[in-house]
């Protein structure tokens, strides 16, 4: 099959979004609402979830471990805020990365029974994860308002940071969802890989804690740059490192293009093995 | 093929399935043969080939209704899925014009985890209908589907009937140019089936309909043209009646070879077992008593008006000619040699009247001795729809007669010919042995006799039955 999209066009991944926006929106909305269907609190759970996690972090790391981020930042609540800023990015990433391998496999109907634009599943999965990121970011800002009495003005940079991250995650979903159809082990592997990536990113510890010669190796983890940048914007009140972010943007953009290309070229094989 | 009139045009279409042992073999197939070619090694393959469909070509004009028949596994669904775009052809190509709404196999098209409502919106979006427009039509879809509060439940909790109701309701509301219906109606109840049939008949006037079914009666009834697929190949494409007849004859032959010598037709599949539905009634103790109980023949009270007003239902009967009958088949222990329709005087006539008592005579010569022969017939209308029929089974069940080789048998069915709508009719006749449920066709002739009705006052339904009396009374007077 020849792809509907002109794959040589580097903007083709985003044309999916324009062409099928209504479907992406419907699927994402259904995904968010559907998760809590039948529960008493419903959508409130997407608010409770980050709130309760934040409470646990504060208790465990602040009160029990009495952890300190560095010399400047001490205190139970401050550590929780810093930790939470990093974990939010990780949760969004992990949600997408863990669901991706089964995305096509679990929607066999969309492959075999209807004419469905499968490529939109990446965007709608990302859309629902972004919604949860938005809610937990609001919880974080509310919490830091209580702790610090103020939020830094640099939060205006946060959407830019997320925008840089989006092509990478979307691309990853295309890549993993396609591979997941053929390599069923991927589902198991991704659970481990996302946990490893969480610990190998400066989420529970500052990057400066790593010995000088290894410190920049951490940038091999695609989470590192984004975690640092969002923490800069949301917690430290400073502009992110634009050079790092700029390079990341270019890489993420190329990755999304390549992944989309791969997805469109392999999708004709989906029906054969589902 | 540039004509605007073609809705579907299929060109030497083929679908090959590569059967892979493991999903990962599919991935290897995408990568290694290419790498292999670069390294100068050809023919790396990780699969086995299976052609579900091959070399199928036809085109459908706007407004046409085409039936697709064939046994299970003949490639019908594969063909439809390719027309709808869910499957991609391995060779050949398909061109379609306009929006195609599909009612494919049960369960297709819905996400089982979604509620009915969500599926309505999602399907609508997939058909390219804006959400605002869908909101307007939602009430109408809901009332067509008539599944009540289940619309808010996940589709996985639906019964198969509800499933097809919802699917049909959606398909009926997307302004399709082409409607593809695959077996879907078989699970609905009578009322819903009628609703769907009404919709489809209405749809036929404005759109193209592709209808797939095992039910040859439904196909003959609905379609002017049929395509017969067998094991992925197209056998015939032509007028429905001739295609269906060939198909039935072939099926019969296939069944026959499957059980060895005899022609065994199981009930439900068989045409003859349907003949004379009265056979399902508990029979009275003696057939003689039963005859006595039959009330005096009812004559339509309007006979004088009908006969005098020049409105008589003239029926022109064409002679039985063994050379010009439709397809015939059978095990061959007997041969039907003559079929006649006699008028009320019992004389062979070319002209009879609807509403008159007539006698259908079927004569046969036996090639070998027969135990309990059953004669039967069907009267069919222009579309091949069976209007009525009967057989000799019940009458001779208690005291079956047997006949020797070279003997000639003659069966007579005396009945009042219904008043017929203008048009052409035909009679299928058959001679079988065995019982109503399990029998062997010795000889079946499609369209053994044809006749043509004209000048009919009949306007409502397929046949008119004698009205004993008709009156209007003043209530409460």
Image (cartoon, coloured by chain):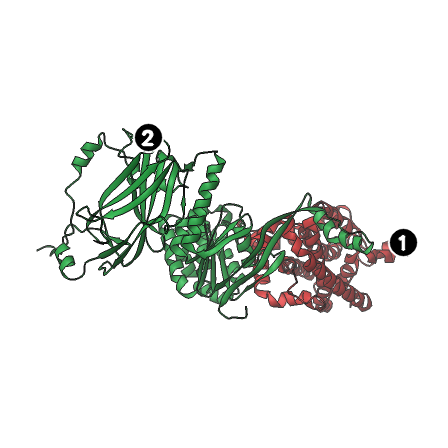
Chain colours: A red, B green
Badges 1 and 2: C-beta atoms under 8 Å apart?
no
Mark 1 vs mark 2: in front: 2
State left or right for residue B383 relative to residue A142: left
The quadrant of the rendering that contains the N terminus of chain B is bottom right
Q: What element carries label 2?
A: loop
State left or right for residue B283 relative to residue B89: left
Write the residue at 62% across / 68% down: A18
| Relative depth, front residue between B436 and B32 | B436
Question: Residue A124: x, y in percent?
Answer: 62, 59
Q: Does the rendering let one see residue A148? A: no
Q: Is mark 1 on a helix, strand or loop?
A: loop
Local packing at callout 2 (Cα closer than 10 Å; few below 14, some 14-19, many 20+) is some
Mark 1 falls within which chain?
A
Report the label total.
2
Image quadrant of residue B21?
A: top right
Q: Judge if badges 1 and 2 mark residues of a common chain.
A: no
Mark 2 falls within which chain?
B
Local packing at callout 1 (Cα closer than 10 Å; few below 14, some 14-19, many 20+) is few
The quadrant of the rendering that contains the C terminus of chain B is bottom left
Question: Residue B254: x, y in percent?
Answer: 48, 41
State left or right for residue B144 relative to residue A1: left
For residue A4, the mark is none
The residue identified by callout 2 is: B404
Residue situated furthest left in the rendering = B477
The residue identified by callout 1 is: A211
Question: Residue B190: x, y in percent?
Answer: 36, 49
Write the residue at 79% across / 52% down: B36
Question: Residue B181: x, y in percent?
Answer: 46, 55
Write the residue at 18% across / 61% down: B311
The answer for how far apart the CA atoms under marks 1 and 2 are is 107 Å
Image quadrant of residue B288?
A: top left
| Relative depth, front residue between A118 and B455 | B455
């Amino acid at each position: 099959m020849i792809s509907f999209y002109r794959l040589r066009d580097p903007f083709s991944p985003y044309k999916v979004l324009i062409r099928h926006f209504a479907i992406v929106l419907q699927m994402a909305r259904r995904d968010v609402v559907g998760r809590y269907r039948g529960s008493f609190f419903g959508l409130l759970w997407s608010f409770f979830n980050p709130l309760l996690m934040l409470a646990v972090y504060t208790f465990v790391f602040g009160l029990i471990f009495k952890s300190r981020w560095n010399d400047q930042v001490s205190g139970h609540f401050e550590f929780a805020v810093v930790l939470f800023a990093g974990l939010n990015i990780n949760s969004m990433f992990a949600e997408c990365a863990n669901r991706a391998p089964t995305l096509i496999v679990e929607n066999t109907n969309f492959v075999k029974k209807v004419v469905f634009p499968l490529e939109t599943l990446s965007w709608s999965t990302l859309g629902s994860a972004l919604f949860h990121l938005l809610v937990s970011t609001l919880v974080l800002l509310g919490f830091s308002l209580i702790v610090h009495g103020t939020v830094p003005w640099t939060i205006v940079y946060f959407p830019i940071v997320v925008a840089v991250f989006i092509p990478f995650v979307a691309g990853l979903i295309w890549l993993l969802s396609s591979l997941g159809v053929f390599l069923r082990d991927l589902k198991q592997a991704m659970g481990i890989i996302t946990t490893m990536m969480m610990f190998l990113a400066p989420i529970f510890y500052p990057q400066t804690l790593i010995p000088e010669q290894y410190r920049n190796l951490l940038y091999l983890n695609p989470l590192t740059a984004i975690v640092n940048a969002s923490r800069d914007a949301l917690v430290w009140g400073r502009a992110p490192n634009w050079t790092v972010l700029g390079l990341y943007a270019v890489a993420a953009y190329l990755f999304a293009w390549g992944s989309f290309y791969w997805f469109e070229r392999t999708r004709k094989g989906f029906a054969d093995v589902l | 093929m540039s004509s605007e009139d073609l809705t579907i045009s299929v060109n030497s279409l083929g679908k090959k399935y590569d059967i892979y042992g493991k999903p990962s073999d599919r991935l290897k197939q995408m990568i290694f043969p290419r790498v292999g070619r670069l390294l100068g090694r050809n023919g790396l393959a990780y699969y086995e080939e299976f052609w579900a469909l091959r070399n199928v070509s036809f085109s459908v004009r706007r407004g046409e209704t085409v039936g697709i028949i064939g046994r299970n596994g003949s490639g019908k669904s594969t063909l439809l899925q390719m027309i709808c775009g869910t499957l991609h052809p391995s060779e050949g190509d398909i061109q379609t014009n306009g929006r195609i709404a599909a009612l494919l196999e049960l369960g297709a098209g819905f996400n089982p985890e979604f509620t009915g409502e969500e599926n309505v919106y999602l399907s609508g979006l997939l058909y390219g209908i804006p959400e605002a427009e869908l909101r307007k039509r939602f009430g109408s879809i809901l009332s067509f589907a008539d599944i009540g509060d289940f619309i808010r439940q996940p589709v996985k909790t639906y019964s198969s009937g509800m499933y097809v109701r919802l699917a049909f309701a959606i398909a009926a509301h997307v302004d399709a140019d082409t409607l593809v219906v695959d077996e879907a109606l078989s699970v609905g109840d009578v009322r819903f089936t009628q609703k769907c049939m009404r919709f489809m008949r209405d749809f036929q006037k404005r759109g193209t309909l592709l209808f797939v079914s095992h039910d040859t009666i439904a196909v003959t009834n609905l379609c002017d043209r049929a395509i017969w697929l067998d094991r992925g190949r197209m056998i015939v494409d032509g007028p429905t009646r001739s295609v269906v007849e060939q198909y039935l004859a072939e099926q019969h032959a296939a069944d026959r070879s499957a059980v060895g010598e005899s022609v065994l037709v199981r009930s439900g599949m068989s045409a003859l077992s349907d003949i004379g539905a009265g056979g399902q009634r508990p029979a009275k103790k003696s057939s003689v008593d039963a005859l006595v109980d039959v009330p005096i023949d009812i004559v339509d009270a309007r006979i004088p008006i009908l006969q005098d007003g020049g409105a008589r239902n003239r029926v022109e009967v064409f002679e039985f000619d063994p050379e010009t009958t439709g397809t015939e088949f059978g095990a061959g222990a007997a041969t039907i040699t003559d079929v006649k329709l006699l008028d009320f005087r019992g004389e062979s006539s070319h002209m009879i009247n609807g509403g008159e008592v007539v006698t259908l005579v079927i004569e046969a010569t036996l090639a070998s001795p027969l135990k309990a022969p059953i004669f039967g017939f069907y009267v069919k209308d222009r579309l091949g729809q069976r209007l009525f029929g009967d057989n000799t089974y019940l009458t001779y069940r208690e005291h079956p007669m047997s006949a020797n080789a070279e003997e000639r048998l003659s069966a007579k069915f005396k009945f009042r010919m219904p008043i017929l709508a203008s048009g052409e009719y035909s009679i299928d006749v058959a001679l079988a042995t065995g019982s109503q449920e399990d029998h062997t066709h010795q000889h079946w002739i499609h369209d053994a006799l044809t006749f043509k009705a004209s000048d009919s006052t009949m306007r409502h339904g397929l046949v008119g039955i004698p009205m004993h009396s008709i009156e209007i009374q003043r209530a409460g007077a």
